[in-house]
Amino acid sequence: MKAYVRIDTVDQRVELADVEVPSPDADEVALEVHAFGVGVHDRYFISPEVAVPYVIGLEAAGVVTAVGSAVHGVAVGDRVMATTMMNPKGGTWAESVVVNQRGVAPIPDEFDFTTAAAIPIAGDAAVECMHTLGMQPNQTLYVAGASGAIGTLVVQLAAQRGVRVVGAASPANHDYVRSLGAELAVDYRDPAWADAVRAWAPGGVDSALAIQPGTPASSRAVVRDGGHLVSVSGDPCPSERGIFVEQFAHRPDVGADMAELVEAIAHGRINLEIERVYAFDEALAALEKTETRHARGKVVVEVRRAGTSATKGHPAPSAGTERG
C-alpha cells in the first residue's frame, strides 16, 4: 500500500513509500482509510524504538476491513473514526491502518469521512482542556491560538457554558473568533494586545489556555493574581503572583464528553471548521500548511482510490471547506 513514512527515527523527513499492509492482532481493528486529519505533531510524534520506514499520523476515518478475535462491538463494514498513539505497526497516513479497539468510534450518519477524520485529536484535546480548566459561568478565559483546530472548539465549548472568552488570532481571523462566541479578539503581534485584554478583564483573566508554542509566558502576563494557566504547547513556564501553572495532560475520563462533542457537531450546535481538504498526493503540502500554525480550524487529507469515493454521507458541517 501507499503510505507517508519516516525513514529515520532522527531525521524528520517524510516520504511517500510502498509498505506492507498491516494485519490486526486479537485486540485490533483494521480499516481502509478514506481520510486522515493533519496535525502539527504528525511529523515528529513517533517512538524512537519503532522500526523504519514508519507510517506517521494519529487520526483517520474509514471502513473496517477486519477485526481481531478479541474485538467486540465493531464489525467489518462499519464506518469508524480512529486514533492510534505510536502503534509499532504504524500510523494513519496510509491506505490502511490497524488500531486498538479502544481507539475506534462509530461515525454518525451526518458525517462524511473528511468530517470524521477532523475530530479525534482536536476534539479530544478540546474536551480535556475544558476539564483541566474547570471553569464556571461568568469567569474569564484567554485563549492563545483561538482560531486553530483545538482553539476553535474550546472557544465554542467555553462560551456555551457561560464563560467569557477573549481569543488571540491574526487580524484576518478576528471576525471568525468572535463568531465562535469570543467577546474580544486580539492580535498577538500587536504590542498593545495585553493592554486590551486587561482593559476587557480588569485585574486579569481568571484562566488562560496557551495552545500555540511560545505563548505560556505572555499568556501568564494577562492572568490575574492567583489565577490558572494551562500550557498545551508544552513550553515550561514558572509560576508567579500565585498563578497555578499546569501542563496539559491527556485524561482517561473524557469519553462521555467526547461523545457529547461529536453529537453537538453532528447536530450543528458546535462548528467544526475544516480550512481545506487535500488530495492524498498533496499530503506533504497539507502537513507544511499545518506546521505554519496559521490554519483556521483543521486540515484534512482524502485518500482517493480508483472506483471509490473518499467521502460519503452528508457534506461536512463547515460551509467554508475548500477542497484541493
Image: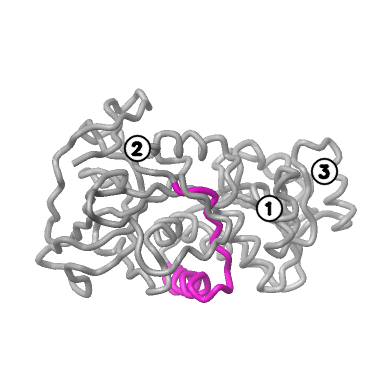
Q: Is residue 213 visible?
A: yes
Q: Taking 116 as reference, is 97 left or right?
A: left
Q: Position of residue 199 (x, y in %)?
A: 90, 53
The boundaries of the magenta stretch are 253-277
As helix, strand or loop, the secondary structure at mark 1 comes to strand
Q: CA distance from mark 1 to mark 2?
A: 34 Å
Q: Which residue corresponds to the image point at 46% horizontal and 68% vertical from the top-left?
A: 258
Task: Please tell me in which quadrant of the rendered image residue 272 appears.
Answer: bottom right
Q: Which mark is residue 143?
A: 1
Residue 109 colored in magenta in the image: no
Residue that numbered label 3 is attached to: 193
Q: Of label 3 and label 1, which has the lower sequence position?
A: 1
As helix, strand or loop, the secondary structure at mark 2 comes to helix
Looking at the image, residue 20 lies above or below residue 141: above
Residue 265 colored in magenta in the image: yes
Assess whether mark 1 and mark 3 are in contact (beta carbons under 8 angstroms). Answer: no
Q: CA distance from mark 3 to mark 2?
A: 40 Å
Q: Position of residue 100 (x, y in %)?
A: 24, 58
Residue that numbered label 2 is attached to: 281
Residue farthest along the left direction in this orientation: 69
Q: Amino acid at mark 3?
A: Trp
Name the quarter where the N terminus is drawn. Answer: top left
Front in this rendered view, residue 282 or 252:
282
Q: Is residue 244 visible?
A: no
Q: Of label 1 and label 2, which has the lower sequence position?
A: 1
For discs 1 and 2, the disc positioned in front in the rendered view: 2
Q: Taking 70 as reference, is 317 left or right?
A: right
For the image, the number of numbered tags is 3
Q: Amino acid at mark 2?
A: Asp
Looking at the image, residue 11 lies above or below residue 131: above
Q: Which residue corresponds to the image point at 45% horizontal and 34% vertical from the top-left?
A: 285
Q: CA distance from mark 3 to mark 1?
A: 13 Å
